[in-house]
Image: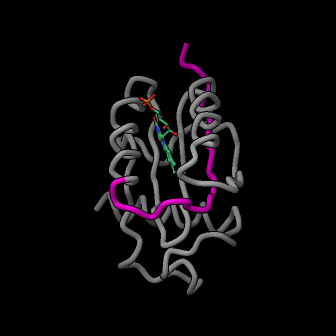
Amino acid sequence: MQSELKRVVYVSEKTDVSDTTLKDIIASSKKNNPEEDVTGCLLSGSNSFLQLLEGPTEFIDTLYSKISRDNRHENVITLCDEKIDERLFLSWSMKLAPFENMEWSNENFNSGNFLNITSEEALNMFVRLNEYTRK
Ligand SMILES: Cc1cc2nc3c(=O)[nH]c(=O)nc-3n(C[C@H](O)[C@H](O)[C@H](O)COP(=O)(O)O)c2cc1C
């Protein structure tokens, strides 16, 4: 039987804005996520991260608690934590999504500030990014 799937979306404040940090995070994701059937999408903004994680419930819970304790960011706020039937991001162990070239309704998102984003706005962004990156 296929295990239950869930989706978690969170926003957090960067404590370190270096490119090396981002490279390390992506390297960990590429190493760990496929082993646990985790997929998702990460937006690295000017001052914040916005991430969507999808996969088997037990793996997502463990990963999210590990990520929450990571000191490369702080003030991690859960925007969405729900059971899902289907994933939005099927094929990416962790897609580092380019969002800068797209027009967002909120000026803050264009400049990579996701700190005050609502759950609905975050999900809408991922839906649009998913459509855009599939092309
Ligand atoms: C914004 C952010 C997103 C992260 N996303 C992932 C992820 O999708 N998968 C992952 O394995 N680690 C991710 N990490 C890193 C984890 O917190 C942790 O450092 C890593 O999983 C440790 O992996 P290791 O035990 O293989 O060294 C993320 C960290 C941050 C700050």
Q: Residue at x 51, y 42 (%)?
A: 87
Q: Whole-percent x and y of residue 132?
A: 36, 66
Q: Which residue is drawn at 50% across and 75% down?
A: 112
Residue at far bottom of view:
107
Q: Which residue is drawn at 65% across and 35% down?
A: 65
- Residue 14 drawn in magenta: yes
Residue 82 falls in image quadrant: top right
Report the label total: 0
**Side of 74 where 110 appears, left or right:** left
Q: Whole-percent x and y of residue 47?
A: 54, 70
Which residues fall within the magenta stretch? 1-20
> Quadrant where the N terminus lies?
top right
Residue 8 falls in image quadrant: top right
- Residue 13 drawn in magenta: yes
Q: Nearer the viewer, residue 13 or 119?
A: 13
**Is 34 situated above or below 75?**
above
**Is 96 situated above or below 8?**
below
Q: Which residue is drawn at 58% across and 66% down?
A: 124
Q: Whole-percent x and y of residue 5?
A: 59, 31
